[in-house]
Image: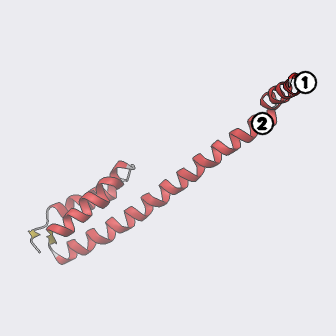
Amino acid sequence: MALSENIIVPIIITIIGSSGFWTLITHIVTSKKEKKSGERAMILGLGHDKIRYLCQKYIERGYITTDEFDNLYTYLYLPYKALGGNGTGERLMNAVMKLPLKKE
């Protein structure tokens, strides 16, 4: 047992101390951050497109139902805004908030 411990400990220390090991760790962490950044950008883009589409539809129609408003505001606009969505979504949402609200 003592002989294997005497060999294993220096090997582990050598691996941890090597620049290649830390380069690998840095690469893994950076790749995950870049992937999350891309996913975030895609979600923002999809949210923006859907908000723009729905807002324009409701504005052209001249009213919005309570269910439509709840769906648009709660499940699309608020998460979009929390992710850092731009002012276009806010401007369109403000226009929709001025529309007459109709019950289903």
Query: Which residue: 26% across, 68% down?
Result: 55
Query: Which residue: 9% across, 71% down?
Result: 102
Tell me the kind of residue under disc 1.
Answer: Leu
Q: Nearer the viewer, residue 44 or 10?
A: 10
**Would you name the residue on which mark 2 appears?**
21
Tell me how the rendering is colored: secondary structure
SS class of the residue under badge 2? Answer: helix
Query: Which residue: 29% across, 60% down?
Result: 75
The percent coordinates of residue 40 (x first, y second) are 48, 54
The percent coordinates of residue 73 (x first, y second) are 24, 59
SS class of the residue under badge 1? Answer: helix
Q: Quadrant of residue 56?
A: bottom left
Location of residue 58 with respect to 47 vertically, above or below: below
Location of residue 83 with respect to 100 vertically, above or below: above
Query: Which residue: 74% across, 35% down?
Result: 22
The percent coordinates of residue 104 (x first, y second) are 11, 75
Q: Nearer the viewer, residue 12 or 6?
A: 6
- Give left or right: position of 12 versus 85: right
Q: Nearer the viewer, residue 92 or 4?
A: 4
Tell me the kind of residue under disc 2.
Answer: Phe
| Numbered tag placed on residue 3 in the rendering | 1
| Numbered tag placed on residue 92 in the rendering | none
Do residues under tags 2 and 1 come within 8 Å of each other at their CB atoms? no
Q: Nearer the viewer, residue 6 or 31?
A: 6
